[in-house]
């Protein structure tokens, strides 16, 4: 299929990308777009519908995340195999999914969890009330496209003190989530680059890069993270890395490797490093290594961070620090793109930072997660004869690598039979590696200490 004809309503309250998403989804559900049928590229679709490419990319990204379409490297987008949804209305499908989701698993070791029971509701309520009590008309006017200056200044201060990031408020851009900022970055960089990803990697960023039509290349890792020698052998000019706590392996990139990576970027004009510092706040052994950006003397590092992991997923507040050459491009060509975060939310988090609430909240969460981390480590000791623990010094998940002859799929299936959801490392692989030993990810942020003990006890019985 090379064209999709649809009647878009430009005056509608429904955004254009949602209209495109709904049209394609309904055609796939009804069978008008057959399983395996090729869809037009985001560039071709945008040209055909006379919309921006980012609008087409947003529609495809939503379809990808819901499983209606699939992306194949160097080939494009294809309708997915979802025959079971053809005869269900969307609302019915959602309802059926919600009814079974909660019953399927008793324990879920998701590595992406956040403990929302510890959210500072009273403080948040107080700050919200104080800000809205001011009754300022300006509060509801369209704000700065980069984000409110006071909030960007507070972010700069926090990043310098906590992560050693050197930046000015003018270099900071605020956005509703890392996905939005990545798409904005693609506008600044252009799509003529090839991006190198760690393998295994954070698949959301990888899928987003592919949906934006970037050429990608996987780069293997060793005990220190992305292998710079392997990176140098590719024709990539952008490296996407998570050096403070590699996702999903948990590797912390040592200083020597960081300097090698910075040297690689400095060797050629147009090379950049995208540093995703998604959960650097949680570390349980030693002091955190300062961000890669803090050692950058050649303006080569784009720094990404978020408050979603440390406060709550619904706090869609992320930030991007641009090196000065890219900042100039942004200001000249893309400053017209409006901010996606309301002034109210920005002011709440600004006060949360400036008045010390954030630091106190982090201290509380570190202690909470440290207790769960220690509980999980202790509960896993009986399994030490059949598996090895790694990635346990930071973040909110660890890895178990098995040496008892079991396959990854067998381990996941046995856990599923006991209503326990665990996650395989192979899901994060770009290139399948037959030499990989079966590895399971166990996240502990969403489980209480008692639940961790009970679940691991069950896993110990079914895995041995």
Image (cartoon, rainbow, N blue to C red):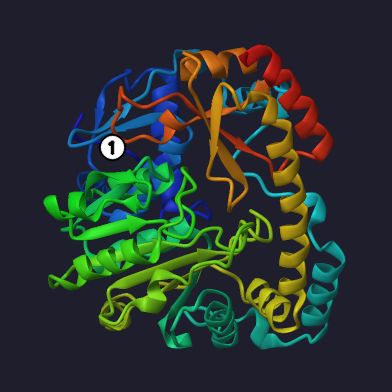
The relative height of residue 272 versus residue 151 in the rendered view (above or below) is above
Quarter holding residue 110: top right
Query: Residue, x 72% and y 73% (percent of image)?
Result: 359
Return the x and y of residue 102 as percentages of the image width and height: 73, 26
Residue 15 placement, left or right of 371: left
Task: Let me know if residue 419 appears in the view.
Answer: no
The relative height of residue 346 versus residue 439 in the rendered view (above or below) is below
Quadrant of the drawing holding the C terminus? top right
Return the x and y of residue 261 as percentages of the image width and height: 27, 64
Callout 1: 10 Å neighbours few (<14), some, many (20+)?
A: few
Residue with the mark numbered 1: 5
Q: Closer to the camera, 192 or 91?
A: 192
Q: How many marks?
A: 1
Return the x and y of residue 37 as percentages of the image width and height: 26, 23
Task: Let me know if residue 114 appears in the view.
Answer: yes
Return the x and y of residue 220 as percentages of the image width and height: 28, 43
The relative height of residue 217 versus residue 351 in the rendered view (above or below) is above
Query: Residue, x 57% and y 85% (percent of image)?
Result: 157
Residue 293 placement, left or right of 357: left
Quadrant of the drawing holding the N terminus? top left
The relative height of residue 216 versus residue 310 in the rendered view (above or below) is above
Residue 154 placement, left or right of 430: right
Q: Closer to the camera, 361 or 12?
A: 361
Quarter holding residue 283: bottom right
């Amino acid at each position: 299929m090379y064209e999709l004809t649809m009647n878009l309503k430009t005056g509608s309250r429904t955004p254009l990308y949602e209209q495109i998403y709904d049209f394609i989804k309904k055609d796939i559900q009804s069978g008008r777009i057959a399983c395996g049928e090729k869809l037009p590229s985001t560039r071709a679709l945008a040209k055909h519908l006379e919309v921006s490419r980012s609008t087409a990319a947003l529609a495809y990204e939503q379809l990808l995340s819901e499983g209606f379409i699939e992306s194949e490297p160097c080939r494009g987008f294809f309708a997915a195999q979802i025959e079971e949804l053809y005869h269900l209305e969307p609302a019915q499908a959602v309802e059926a999914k919600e009814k079974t989701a909660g019953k399927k698993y008793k324990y879920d070791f998701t590595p992406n969890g956040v403990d929302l029971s510890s959210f500072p509701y009273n403080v948040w309520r107080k700050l919200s009330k104080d800000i809205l009590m001011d009754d300022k008309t300006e509060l509801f006017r369209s704000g700065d496209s980069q984000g409110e200056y006071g909030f960007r200044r507070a972010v700069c201060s926090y990043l310098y003190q906590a992560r050693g990031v050197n930046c000015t408020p003018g270099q900071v851009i605020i956005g509703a989530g890392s996905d939005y900022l990545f798409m904005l970055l693609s506008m600044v960089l252009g799509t003529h680059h090839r991006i190198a990803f760690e393998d295994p990697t954070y698949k959301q960023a990888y899928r987003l890069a592919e949906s934006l039509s970037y050429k990608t290349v996987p780069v293997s890792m060793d005990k220190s993270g992305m292998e710079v020698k392997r990176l140098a052998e590719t024709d990539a000019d952008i490296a996407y890395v998570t050096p403070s706590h590699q996702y999903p392996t948990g590797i912390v990139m040592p200083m020597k490797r960081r300097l090698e990576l910075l040297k690689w970027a400095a060797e050629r004009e147009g090379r950049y490093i995208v540093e995703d510092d998604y959960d650097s706040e949680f570390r349980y052994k030693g002091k955190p290594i300062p961000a890669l950006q803090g050692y950058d003397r050649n303006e080569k590092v784009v720094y990404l961070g978020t408050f979603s992991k440390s406060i709550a997923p619904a706090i869609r507040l992320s930030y991007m620090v641009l090196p000065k050459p890219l900042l100039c491009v942004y200001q000249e060509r893309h400053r017209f793109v409006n901010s996606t975060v309301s002034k109210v939310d920005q002011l709440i988090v600004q006060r949360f930072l400036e008045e010390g609430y954030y630091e106190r909240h982090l201290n509380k969460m570190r202690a909470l997660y440290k207790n769960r981390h220690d509980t999980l480590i202790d509960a896993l000791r009986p399994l030490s004869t059949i598996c090895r623990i790694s990635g346990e010094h930071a973040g909110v998940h660890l890895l178990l690598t098995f040496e008892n002859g079991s396959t990854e799929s067998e381990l996941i299936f046995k856990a599923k039979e006991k209503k326990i959801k665990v996650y395989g490392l192979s899901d994060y692989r770009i290139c399948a590696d037959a030499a990989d030993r079966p590895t399971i990810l166990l996240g502990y942020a969403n489980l209480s200490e008692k639940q961790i003990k009970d679940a691991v006890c069950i896993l110990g019985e079914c895995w041995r």
